[in-house]
Image (cartoon, rainbow, N blue to C red):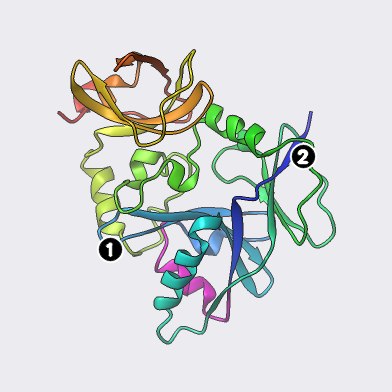
Amino acid sequence: MLKLAHLPARAVLSVSGEDRVPFLQGLVSNDVALAAPGRAVWAALLTPQGKYLADFFIFADTDRLLLDCERDQAPMLATRLSRFRLRSKVVVAGTGLAVSVAWDGIPDLPANAIGAPDPRLAAAGFRILSKMPMQSEANEADYDRHRLLLGLPDGTRDCEPEKTVLLEAGFDELDGISWTKGCYMGQELTARTRYRGLLKRRLVPVTSHAALPPPGTPLLHEGRDIGTMRSSSEGLGLAVLRLEHLHGTVEFGGWTMQARVPDWMRLPEPSATPA
């Protein structure tokens, strides 16, 4: 049965002007040229050192690109993108468009709405941009549990600005990185992490019979740091854990949680796991 929810915590920025595609292409992790009607692209903006700053879905709309981003990050994102304009013929601005999501079915889009399948996973559903919030059969909390079950990160709730490496948060398997498009800001560390097998931690789904600890809570096992709690909803959440703790029960400070590796995630062979 189709479920549809408005996401008030999301906002939409516009990048317009004749240089919009090459401008973004040199800044973000994915191939902006792939955005087309009915096809969105998921990408991230990184620091020059290759650490996460923001992520967003890129939609193509006639003479502009639309960035479905975290509302709290929209001012920062607009400022940073504008800072890189130099002589590029682009304009970055807010739009006032609403973001909705649909899953467990295909939605009927209203006139003038822009929609596309979530480019990360087919099971994630559809993302929709419209002038007014769409009539919803579900709410933001329902969608939150849906994406947590799939193991999908949600912006700064799961990725720490200036700290998270994209491959830790699944951007490779979830098609948030292009390995062929050429240079972009932060590309060097991203490529080195992949080709040298430098990952030591991953963001994975966790479950507990009790409410999970708040985001940012250090996770310890026998006095040793094994990771950090990220977003959660009741007994379902995401946590960054060391590779050797991704399977089975994790006990820490009186809490017990079960870590689970989602089907879409690729892990190194045990012999290749970094020490």
- Is 152 left, or right, of 14 in this rendering? left
- Residue 50, percent across and down? 29, 56
On the question of residue 175 being in view, the answer is yes
Q: Which label belongs to residue 89? A: none
Where residue 36 sits in the image (x, y, percent)? 64, 61
Quarter occupied by the N terminus = top right
Q: Amino acid at mark 1?
A: Pro
Residue at point 40%, 69% (across, down): 26
* Marks 1 and 2 close (CB-CB < 8 Å): no
Give residue 106's mark. 2
Disc 1 crowd rating (10 Å Cα; few below 14, some 14-19, many 20+) is some
- The image shows residue 169, relative to residue 214, as above or below, that is below
* Residue at 46% from the left image edge and 65% from the top image edge: 77
Give yes or no for residue 121 being in the magenta stretch: no
User: At 23% across and 49% down in the image, what residue appears?
Assistant: 192
Q: Mark number for residue 48?
A: 1
Marks 1 and 2, Cα distance to the nearest angstrom? 39 Å
Decide if residue 245 is on the left or right side of residue 4. left
Sequence-earlier tag: 1 or 2: 1
Q: Is residue 221 above or below residue 239?
A: above
**Mark 1 or 2: the one toward you:** 1
Find the magenta span and give its range: 15-29
Q: Position of residue 161 (x, y in %)?
A: 35, 52
Q: Image quadrant for the C terminus?
A: top left
Q: Quadrant of residue 221 in the image? A: top left
Q: Relative to 61, does residue 178 appear above or below in the rendering?
A: above
